[in-house]
Image: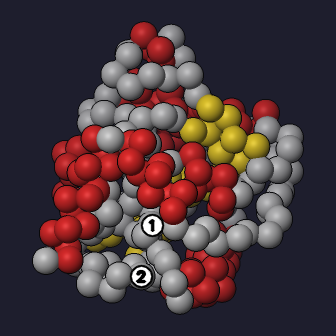
Amino acid sequence: MRKFTEEVKPSRAVFVKWPLGHPFGEPFKVRQHNAVIRKAFEALKTIKKPGTIIDLPFRWRRDEDWEDKN
Amino acid sequence: MSRLKNKLLAKIFTRFPFLAELWVKKIAPWKVEGTPWSPFNKDLKDCKIALVTTAGVHLKTQKPFDMKDPDGDPSFREIPLDTPKEDLMITHDYYDHRDADKDMNVVFPIDRLKEMRDGGEIAEISEINFGLMGHISGRHIYTLINETSQCIAKSLKDAKVDAVLLTPG
């Protein structure tokens, strides 16, 4: 939940509006998992302001959103 | 009965996220002062990465997280890098982890990191990674902040980890 992330105030965060228990997506969808991980790693360098949360534009079960991010 | 109720709530919150948001707004948040910050300038391909998850992941041989305490369990479990995935399990009643039970990478993407390491995207993965359960409230918040997190941070620093991927359940 985004509210938790806002309250915890991590240095850097990426957020996906997906169901609880699915931070990297669906089981066995390797490319989907990688899309989120790579965005998180990108955030290591792109986030310059402490506490920034990047909302990823990936919709649940809309593979076209992340297929080109690998 | 309490565990059954928690599991039922977890399924409802997974199915109807707006109800979970309402629940979060109702509970008194712990006020965190300030945001820690370390500049990051290293190339990812030269980095040692660690995974820390609050999704309740642990080895089957380790003591499961305490699901009877309504304030949660602020302890942690060490997960060695070479742990076979069939030796891992999840103990966490506060989210629906049926999909993560099928494929642990949904919450603990250790296979994905190994592929990235083998492909040269990252240099190394920490020999020890960490599992916690992310439903901590009341008196356990103090333990989590002042004992558990300090202990994990020291281990990661001693292991010369460059960056940590924190994953929720």
Q: Amino acid at mark 1?
A: Gly
What colour scheme governs how the chains and residues are painted in the rendered image of this protein?
secondary structure
A60 in relation to A10, above or below? above
Residue drawn where x is 56% and y is 81% of the image: B141
SS of the residue under disc 1: loop
Q: Position of residue B68 (x, y in %)?
A: 26, 84
Q: What is the chain identity of the residue bearing mark 1?
A: B
Quarter of the image holding residue B135? bottom left
Q: Quadrant of the N terminus of chain B?
A: bottom left
Q: Position of residue A60 (x, y in %)?
A: 38, 25
Judge the density around disc 2: few (<14), some (14-19), many (≥20) Cα neighbours within 10 Å.
some
Measure the C-alpha gap from mark 2 to mark 1: 10 Å
Residue at the disc numbered 1:
B134
Could you say where residue B152 lies in the image, as x and y percent from the top left? 59, 75
Residue B161 or residue B37, whichever sits in front: B37
Q: Amino acid at mark 2?
A: Asp
Element class at badge 2: loop
The crowding category of the residue bearing disc 1, from other C-alpha atoms within 10 Å (few below 14, some 14 to 19, many at least 20), is some
Label 2: which residue?
B71
Q: Position of residue A40 (x, y in %)?
A: 61, 38
Q: Nearer the viewer, mark 2 or mark 1?
A: 2
Residue B102 left/right relative to A19: left
